Every structure is written in structure tokens, then in C-alpha cells.
Amino acid sequence: MRDAPAPRLHLFVCANRREGSPLGPGCGERGEAVYDALKREVGRRGEIATTWVTKTYCLGICPREGATVARWPSGATSAIVTEVAPADVDALLGSREAGAGAGAPRGDEPAVAELSRELDALEELQRKKVLDLARRLKPGLTLEDVQNPHDFPELDDPDWHYADGVLAGVQSVKSALSAMLRGRAKRED
Ligand code: FES
């Protein structure tokens, strides 16, 4: 076991679905909506490197309305909040100024935010390209399938490998940027 770099804020959003359970249907769609709203807002703020949002299974609260979200670090409020709706996104993320004070980029923030957005868009585009190409080689493949290309001999194709390599390159740059920002945040603590 070893320590790993941590974000400024990590939100875990329950999107668990349950069928026929006495505890109700789970956060399901409501959790998906909260997750989507958080990802959008984090992207809009240019904070993807310092604010992480992760979808989870049941967090043990199972509200009738909204979704349950766990926060790390919890700050002044509870580590678990429930009945969360997409309109609560700003309250969950806190002010931009608070984020900047806790290690977000300083003078180069606009440029880094722009670069982060570009890399996100590039990754999305390339991921779609990799999947489209894979489905031409073997219809019906999923994103998860293409992450295990050795299970599908049809993917032993030079064009597909090239596209997948470009995707890996974009993801490496994203990781390097995240690591750089986390290192900076740590030094400024
Ligand atoms: S289903 Fe979301 S907290 Fe249990």
C-alpha cells in the first residue's frame, strides 16, 4: 500500500438501481442526473484536475427523493448528504474562489482550464473514433469490450491499434497534467 495524490474534492454520487426492493428503486436516474450536472459544472469551471466526481453503488441511505452523495474531505458539513438534486451542484462544489484557495491553478488558470477542456473534447472524440472503428470490425462491441482488445481477435487491425494508441496518448497527457496540478496543489498546502 502507498499514498497516492488526492484531489481537492472528491464526490461520490450514488446512481444505484434496485428492482423490487422494499428500500425503493435506489438513487438510479436521480443519481445519474446529479452526476451529469456535477461533471458539467466541474468542466465549466475548469476544475477537472482538482475536483473528481465518481459514480457509486448504494451508500446506505436510499432516499425517496434525489440522490445520496459522499464527500471527501467533508469540510464543515456532513460527509454524506442526501436528497441531492442537480440544482444543489454549486452547494456541493463550493465557490470557485474556495477551490482556487485550495490548490487550483493560479495565474495560468485560464490557459490550464482551456487546455483541460480541449483534452477532454479530444479524448471524447478519439474514444468515439476507436469505438466506431471497433464496431466496423466486430459489430456490437462496447466501450468496455474495446478496453480488453485481446479478447477480440477482430481488433488485431493496424488502423484500430493506431487509433487506440492516439487515445492512449491523449489520456497520458491528461494524466500528466493532472499529476502536475496535484503536485502544485500539494506544494502550496
Ligand atoms: S440507492 Fe442510493 S443510497 Fe442507497
Image (cartoon, rainbow, N blue to C red):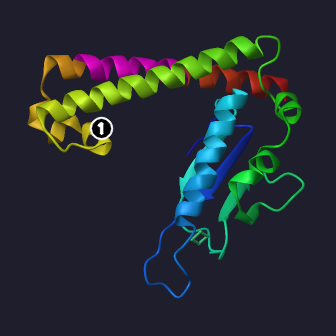
Q: Quadrant of residue 162?
A: top left
SS for tag 1? loop
Residue 6, visible in the rendered structure: no
Residue 63 placement, left or right of 27: right
- Position of residue 154 measured from the top left corner of the image (x, y, whole percent): 9, 33
Residue 100, visible in the rendered structure: yes
Residue 39 placement, left or right of 156: right
Magenta-span inclusion, residue 168: yes
Which residue is at the far bottom?
Answer: 22
- Residue at image x 77%, y 20%? 105
- Residue at image x 82%, y 62%? 78
Q: Is label 1 within 8 A of ligand 1 (CB to nearest ligand atom)?
A: no
* Residue matched to label 1: 147
- Position of residue 96 measured from the top left corner of the image (x, y, whole percent): 83, 32
Q: Residue type at mark 1?
A: Gln
Image vertical order of residue 97 relative to residue 3, above or below: above
- Residue at image x 76%, y 53%? 88
Image vertical order of residue 87 relative to residue 163, above or below: below
- Position of residue 19 measured from the top left corner of the image (x, y, whole percent): 43, 78
- Where is ligand 1, by quadrant? bottom right
Callout 1: 10 Å neighbours few (<14), some, many (20+)? Answer: few
Which residue is at the far left?
Answer: 153
Q: Is the magenta stretch mostly helix, strand or loop?
A: helix
Image vertical order of residue 51 relative to residue 92, above or below: above
- On the rendered image, what quadrant is the C terminus found in? top right
Residue 149 placement, left or right of 6: left
Q: Nearer the viewer, residue 42 or 9?
A: 42
- Position of residue 95 measured from the top left corner of the image (x, y, whole percent): 86, 38
Q: In which quarter of the image is residue 131?
A: top left
Question: From which residue to which does the magenta span run?
Answer: 162-174
